[in-house]
């Protein structure tokens, strides 16, 4: 995959297309992104004699869902086209999905350093109101115009930083899952993800002393995270319990016809909450952990299924129940074995927990980049937060700190 972040992104794009003998292009953007960059891209393509089909998605809130997939898919013809997504992570997810289904290549041209999914192979889609990651394909190239990125709305830039700060809890969750349930773990990829996250945290301390460098660093880091997901063929290097919270909120807002919130904004807020779970774990001695584990009975699968229906609604509950089949089918002996493993590895669990900053430290980082630190600031209510604490664990099948705290009877109180 070729990646470029700089001031010659359009020229680099033209050269790449020529080198690869691409002629037929489908350009996809929305009205804002077309104004920000898409029009210049289209004009450059036509001036260089490429045949361009231009698709501009319209609507107050563009979503990676069946409605907008259809708008990109229906104009497809029999020509072998390269798709170019000019815009956000949402637009990239739509085009990634369509290009995969039409056996076409696609190129991503981000207009804001807002999310970490530009280089990934999965499309984060909401199909029939159910948030899920659908196998698609990575871009063959990413060309990010630095001037456009620097002029992006500040809340989108803060969203990108928020997505990166979510790696504090995501990487801890990945390591925890490897330790307790033998989930595959790649220490080299984890180190790459951590390094990208740390570069963003360092820029947050000196933000705006060199704006172009700030934006270059965060965009590079977001691309690096996507590559980490691509190499491991899953989202574990970049996504844990904080993304479970984010996806729960996204589905709720959609179901209740409430305004959407940027993905990284939700992830940043959720990271503060998830850090509180790790703070609770750090506060327990081994003796206290044993006492809690002994007092906490195995969950009732039928009660879990009822909770899923309560939290997500009957329309999508069956899909979530299916995704949670491993959790719901856990036997009593398996539950006891897992409890014994938690006790055996308590010191290592503590080491992992100490890698997660305190909630106040994550909140401070978000404040420095202009990110939201209180749910009410972006339209989330206390009910939304309380329900996420109760139901977010079920969004994905991956083992996270939420599963560990459930086994120990630890509940977050706000």
Image (cartoon, rainbow, N blue to C red):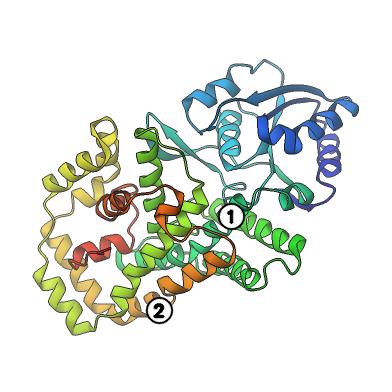
Q: Position of residue 371 (x, y in %)?
A: 54, 59
Q: Position of residue 112 (x, y in %)?
A: 66, 48
Residue ID at (60%, 25%): 58
Q: Is residue 245 above or below residue 81?
A: below
Residue ID at (58%, 56%): 158
Residue ID at (39%, 75%): 352
- Is 258 on the left-hand or right-hand side of 408? right
Between residue 296 and residue 157, name the one nearer to us.
157
Residue on which the image places disc 2: 354
Residue on which the image places disc 1: 160
Asked if residue 105 shows in the view, the reply is: no
- Is 410 on the left-hand or right-hand side of 277? left
Q: Secondary structure at mark 2?
A: helix
Asked if residue 318 shows in the view, the reply is: yes
Q: Are marks 2 and 1 in contact (CB under 8 Å)?
A: no
Between residue 82 and residue 59, name the one nearer to us.
59
Q: Position of residue 407 (x, y in %)?
A: 20, 64
Q: Residues within 10 Å of mark 1 (few under 14, many from 20)?
A: many
Q: Residues within 10 Å of mark 2 (few under 14, many from 20)?
A: some
Q: Is residue 258 above or below residue 234?
A: above
Q: Is residue 36 above or below residue 282?
A: above
Residue ID at (58%, 43%): 89
Q: Secondary structure at mark 1?
A: helix
Q: Quadrant of the C terminus?
A: bottom left
User: Most extreme residue toward the front, as rendered?
Assistant: 377
Which comes sooner in the sequence, label 2 or label 1? 1
Q: Position of residue 405 (x, y in %)?
A: 25, 65
Between residue 160 and residue 95, name the one nearer to us.
160
Measured Cα–Cα span from mark 2 to mark 1: 24 Å
Q: Quadrant of residue 105?
A: top right
Mark number, residue 22: none
């Amino acid at each position: 995959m070729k990646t470029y972040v700089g001031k010659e992104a359009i020229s680099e794009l033209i050269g790449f297309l020529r080198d690869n003998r691409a002629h037929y292009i489908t350009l996809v953007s929305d009205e804002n992104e077309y104004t920000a960059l898409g029009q210049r891209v289209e004009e450059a393509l036509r001036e260089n004699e490429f045949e361009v089909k231009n698709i501009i998605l319209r609507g107050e809130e563009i979503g990676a869902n069946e409605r907008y997939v259809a708008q990109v898919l229906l104009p497809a013809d029999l020509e072998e086209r390269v798709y170019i997504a000019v815009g956000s992570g949402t637009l990239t997810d739509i085009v990634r999905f369509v290009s995969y289904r039409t056996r076409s290549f696609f190129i991503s041209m981000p207009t804001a350093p807002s999310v970490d999914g530009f280089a990934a192979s999965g499309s984060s889609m909401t199909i029939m109101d159910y948030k899920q990651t659908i196998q698609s394909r990575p871009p063959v190239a990413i060309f990010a115009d630095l001037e456009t990125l620097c002029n992006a709305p500040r809340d989108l830039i803060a969203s990108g930083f928020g997505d990166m700060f979510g790696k504090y809890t995501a990487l801890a969750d990945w390591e925890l899952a490897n330790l307790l349930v033998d989930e595959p773990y790649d220490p080299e990829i984890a180190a790459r993800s951590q390094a990208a996250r740390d570069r963003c945290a360092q820029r947050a301390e000196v933000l705006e002393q060199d704006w172009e460098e700030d934006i270059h660093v965060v965009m590079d880091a977001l691309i690096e995270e996507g590559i980490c997901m691509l190499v491991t063929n899953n989202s574990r290097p970049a996504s844990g319990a904080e993304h479970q919270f984010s996806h729960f909120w996204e589905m709720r807002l959609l179901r209740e016809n409430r305004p959407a919130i940027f993905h990284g904004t939700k992830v940043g807020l959720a990271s503060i909450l998830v850090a509180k779970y790790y703070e609770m774990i750090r506060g327990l001695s081994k003796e206290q952990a044993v006492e809690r584990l002994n007092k906490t009975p195995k969950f009732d699968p039928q009660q879990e299924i009822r909770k899923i229906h309560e939290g997500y609604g009957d329309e999508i509950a069956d899909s979530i129940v299916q995704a949670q089949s491993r959790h719901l089918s856990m036997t009593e002996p398996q539950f006891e074995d897992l409890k014994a493993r938690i006790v055996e590895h308590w010191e290592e669990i503590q080491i992992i927990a100490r890698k997660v900053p305190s909630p106040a430290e994550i909140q401070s980082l978000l404040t420095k980049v202009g990110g939201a630190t209180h749910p009410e600031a972006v339209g989330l209510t206390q009910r939304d937060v309380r329900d996420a604490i109760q139901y977010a664990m079920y969004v994905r099948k991956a083992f996270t700190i939420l599963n560990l705290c459930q086994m120990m009877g630890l509940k977050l109180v706000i």
